[in-house]
Amino acid sequence: MENEKRIGLLRVLDPAHECPGYWERFRAEIMERAAFELARRRDLARESVELVLSGWSRSLIPAALAAAVIAAIMVGSEAVRDPGPDASLVLEDVLASDFSDEVLETAITGEAHASPVAFMAFVEGNRP
Amino acid sequence: MRERSDAELVIRARSGHTESFGELVRRYQQPAFSIALSVIGRHQDAEDAVQESFMVALQRLEDCRNPDRFAGWFLTIVRNRSRNLIRRESLRSGDPIPASASNAGPNPEKAASLAELRESLQEALKKLSEVQREIVLLHDLEGWKHSEIADRLGMPSGTVRSHLHFARKALRVELSGWRDHVTAS
């Protein structure tokens, strides 16, 4: 009870005791004074984001270009060094390895060349 | 909607988020006023000190290294600004009632009586130590709990209780003549 009375007395020290809406107005005054600094901070934050992004683009784009050029050079040099087997030539060599040049010439230039069936029949007929 | 923590508000306010800074002002303007009043003892100067403190805090938000502890950090600014204000200026001898409240009284008699009561309270509070004034105002005027005061002023909870006990005891003696006034009004 004693405490409640004293707390009641202390309420007189609160400016809102006599002036309802006092703290809302007080806050509005502070916010008005803070407006410039808050705006400055917003600008700074936006600039920071732009700086980060432009920093990334400055370093990433050249890096990506360099990587592309290096990749192109590597692929090119690899192709020159090792052209790789020509599948069709290899197959022909395997198929023709058992036959004499004479038989092969006839097979390629003669009637046997007209159709796959005739070719196979000729080749099988001349297998050593 | 979930209430944002002080830390979240501080971090957003650093980027210029107006609503977040506004919420910090809403949360701490009254405790800050109590602290300033306990140091300075006059309403108008306490208001100035609180306004200045919010401006300083906003400009130095990056210095608040632990945003979770914003309250303690900010109230220290308030206390220091208030002490600086006392040192810097010889306090005005005018009406301690805020100008905005001067014509708000229900009638001249009651307004005069309230002014007298306010003066007596301020005289009584002057007899306490600064820390006792802070604690009694934060507890009895702002409704902060012992643990909140201890946490935000950075002192043990037992010390807060002890200060509060002695402050109340002293105020009880000083304000004994006003008890009837409160009961009657």
Image: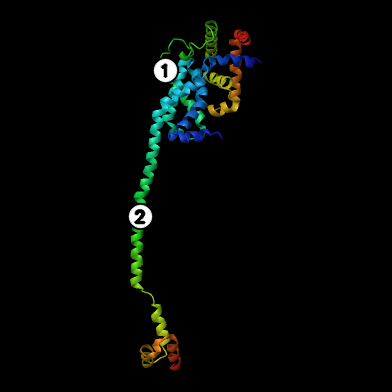
Nearer to the camera, A44 or A89: A89
Which amino acid, mark 1?
Answer: Arg
Same chain for the residues under marks 1 and 2 in the image: no
Would you place residue B140 above or below residue B69 in this image? above
Residue B152 in picture, x, y percent from top left: 54, 28
Q: Which residue sits at x=43%, y=17%?
A: B86
Circles 1 and 2: CB atoms closer than 8 Å: no
Residue placed under numbered mark 2 in the picture: A63
Q: Amino acid at mark 2?
A: Ala
Tell me which chain the residue with mark 1 is part of. B
Q: Position of residue A6 (x, y in %)?
A: 60, 14
Residue B87 - label: 1
Residue A59 placement (x, y as % from top left): 35, 51
- Secondary structure, mark 1, is helix
Furthest-top residue in view?
Answer: B109
Q: Residue at x 52, y 6 (%)?
A: B108
Question: Of circles 1 and 2, which is in front?
Answer: 2
- Tell me how far mark 1 sits from mark 2, CA to CA: 60 Å
SS for callout 2: helix
Tell me the quarter of the image containing the N terminus of chain A: top right
* Residue B170 visible at all: no
The answer to which quarter of the image holds residue B166 is: top right
Q: Position of residue B41 (x, y in %)?
A: 49, 15
Q: Residues within 10 Å of mark 2 (few under 14, many from 20)?
A: few
- Please tell me which residue lies in front, B124 or B118: B118
- For the point 49% across and 13% down, the residue is B101
Relative to residue B97, is residue A112 depicted above or below?
below
Q: Is residue B162 visible?
A: yes
Point out which mark residue A29 bears.
Answer: none
